Image: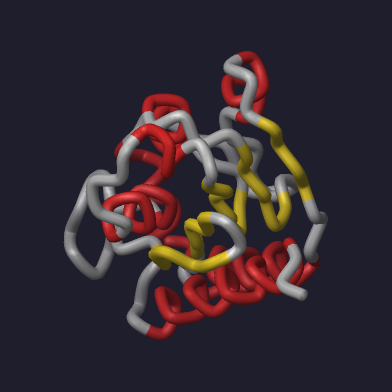
Amino acid sequence: MKNDSYFMELAIKEAEKSLNEGGIPIGAVLVKDGEVISKGHNRLIQNSSVILHAEMDAIEKAGRLNYGDYRKCTLYTTLSPCPMCSGAVILYNIPRVVIGENTTLMGAENLLECNDVEVVVLDDIRCRDLFLKFTCNCSEIWDEELAKVGNTTEVK
């Protein structure tokens, strides 16, 4: 049976795909009724984009779903979603978000929870290790991305 760990594995593969493309290793998978409907990965660097976070990529690739379909979805993401991605989850009424880990970066989990989104954190060390490897090996890229949004928070 497919469970949260199974779908997180797919999100991690998306994060690895981004890293292999020279991007930030964050991946996401959108699942409806236990079936993957889309996958995405962070493409800020690859596409010179300001909004193609992994979560946004996965939501975009799912196409225009109806309200009932979104209400049956779970979004899996390797890292805690930022306010923009959390806003998209709320806007499209996605009721559940499963996060690989939230110790390197804490996103807008409180925003999700205040809007009745179930938040599950798996504490998957692979997500943390993948991101830390990137920030150590490509610190200049990460620092540049943080500077664009006025954030100077260091990765823990």
66 relative position to 138: left or right: left
| Front residue of this view, candidates 135 and 47 | 47
Vertical side of 106 occupied by 130: above or below: below
Q: Nearer the viewer, residue 130 or 15?
A: 15
Residue that appears at 30% across and 63% down: 43
Who's the residue at 18% across and 64% down the image?
47
Check the image and name the residue furthest to the bottom.
20
In-front residue for pair 131/150: 131
Question: Residue 4 vs residue 50: left or right?
Answer: right
Image point (20%, 53%), residue name: 49
Residue 108 in the figure: left or right of residue 147: right
Occupied quadrant, residue 13 = bottom right
Image quadrant where one finds the N terminus? bottom right
Number of numbered discs overlaid on the protein picture: 0
Identify the colour scheme used.
Answer: secondary structure
Extreme residue in the front direction: 68
| Residue most extreme to the top | 114
Residue 72, horizontal then vertical, whole percent: 53, 44
Q: Is residue 132 left or right of residue 4?
A: left
Q: Residue at x 59, y 25 (%)?
A: 112
Q: Is residue 65 above or below residue 110?
A: below
Q: Position of residue 10 (x, y in %)?
A: 58, 75
Residue 94 position in % (x across, y down): 50, 36
Determine which quarter of the picture holds residue 126.
bottom right
